[in-house]
Amino acid sequence: MNQSKPIQDQTRLEAISWKWMRYSGLLLIPLAWGHVLIQDVLVGVHQIDLDYVAMRWATLGWRLYDFLLLAFAFAHGMNGLRQVLQDYIRPPARMRRLTAILFGVWLLISLIGAAAILGGVRQP
Amino acid sequence: MSDIKTAFSGLVSYRGRVGHFSFILHRLTGLGTLLFLIIHILDTSTVYFFPSLYNHAIAIYRSTPMMIGEIILIFCVIYHGVNGARIALFDLFSPRGWQAGVQERSARLTFGIAVVLWLPAAAWMMRSLLINNFGW
């Protein structure tokens, strides 16, 4: 009983992670493709500068869009990296350490991105 | 190091053919997109933390090698999305799609759809590259 409980919890977490990848992935198709189509293909990096970002983020809807993209895409990507690493790292202790590091990196960069979206463009 | 060796010998020795190709391409396009995403979140965050740096970061993206990288990135995002949709739809709603003999066709179709969606985007971005960086 004492031994099977953590294993059960881990299995349940992996099942949630498995479903998360599929549902977030389906949501990311319109979100990420829309972003890429507008910014990379139609607008293009030569039209993008500080004023462009300021103009875009003046609309609350675009800030919300970017916030959702940040939340879903980055969590999907970092969990994907964890799943790939699981295939190659066998010692459980090493994998646990790596998972903790990945979680820390995910949290830190997510917070930096979220702060920027909430704070908006500051004119230099 | 031995892990890396195992990884690569694993790539060679497992001969899942079309499905194996999809598996590798799905992982490579995903990891490639993630690498860019990390850089992209941080460079965009300069608009709040170090606004004077933002236009310098964008200047790097406007260089020719980076714009070619951007065209490759767009392929990664498109292929990962199309093949990801196949994985999600089969896993969640129609596991029969994974049957041998059927799966190979959808794997090829996935790659075909990704290329067809990517070509016009790549052509338009190539046009922008030629106009802006080569004075067409």
Image (spheres, rainbow, N blue to C red):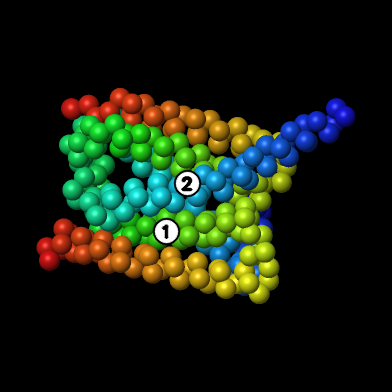
Circles 2 and 1 on the same subunit: no
Residue found at x 33% / y 26%: A118
Amino acid on which disc 1 is placed: Ile
Q: Position of residue B70 (x, y in %)?
A: 33, 56
The foreground one among B29 and A9 is A9
- On the image, numbered disc 2 is attached to which residue? A27
Q: Position of residue A86 (x, y in %)?
A: 65, 46
Q: Position of residue A104 (x, y in %)?
A: 53, 30
Q: Where on the picture, by quarter, is residue A52?
A: top left
Q: Residues within 10 Å of mark 2 (few under 14, many from 20)?
A: some
Q: Secondary structure at mark 1?
A: helix
Residue found at x 56% / y 69%: B106
Residue at the farthest right position: A1
Q: Where on the picture, by quarter, is residue B105?
A: bottom right
Q: Position of residue A16 (x, y in %)?
A: 64, 40
Kindly identify which chain the residue marked by label 1 belongs to.
B
Kindly identify which chain the residue marked by label 2 belongs to.
A
Amino acid on which disc 2 is placed: Leu
- On the image, numbered disc 1 is attached to which residue? B78
Q: Secondary structure at mark 2?
A: helix
> Residue A108 got which mark?
none
